[in-house]
Image (spheres, rainbow, N blue to C red):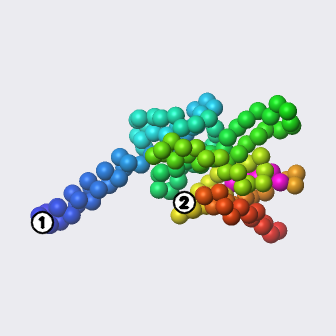
Amino acid sequence: MKPLTLSVFLCFAFSALSHAAQRKIAYERGDNIFVADIDGTHPKKIAAGALPEISPDGTRIAFNTEADAKTRPGPERRIAIADLATGKVTILKEIPSDNCFGPVWSPDGKQLAFSIMAEKAWQLGLVDADDSGFRFVKMWS
């Protein structure tokens, strides 16, 4: 193998290894959300909640909170975002329902799609990750 070819190969290999070391996974254990390195090491509890979804850039986790509704029928579930660098958890307040779940990031990490109970039916909601621009996604049949 030529020295230049070997050098290029080694650069790509080490780049892939260093990138893999930075990647994270998010998961649910019991009633809590955890994040860990891609190989499962260094687990860290993030918050109480369910259905975590790590952002495409690996810096945030979207999930839904889960609270027992003792004074009202049905569960209370809100969409939240945890910043992995600061540990700050933000509950999205501009969503017009207290029964939402299953957030999924857009490929660019700027929006979240999720299930939302509104008008006594499950619908698809979309909100910007900064808690602005909420809208229902219209479904045509």
Task: Tell me where the magenta segment starts and ends, as one range.
Answer: 114-118
The amino acid type of the residue labelled 1 equals Lys
Q: Where residue 57 appears, x then y in whole percent?
A: 47, 56
Reply yes or no: does residue 116 show up in magenta.
yes
Residue at 61%, 47% in the rendered image: 90
- The answer to whether residue 102 is visible is no
From the image, give the main secondary structure of the stretch colored magenta: strand
Q: What element does badge 2 sit on?
A: loop
Quarter containing the C terminus: bottom right
The quadrant in which residue 2 appears is bottom left
Cα–Cα span, label 1 and label 2 = 41 Å
Q: Decide which of 91, 67 is in the foreground and name it.
A: 91
- Residue 2: give its label: 1
Residue 21 spot, x, y in % from top left: 35, 46
Q: Is residue 87 above or below residue 95?
A: above
Q: Is residue 28 above or below residue 2?
A: above
Which residue in the structure is indicated by mark 2? 109
Q: Nearer the viewer, residue 48 or 11?
A: 48
Q: Amino acid at mark 2?
A: Gly
Q: Is residue 97 magenta?
A: no
Element marked by disc 1: loop
Residue at 54% from the left image edge and 44% from the top image edge:
88
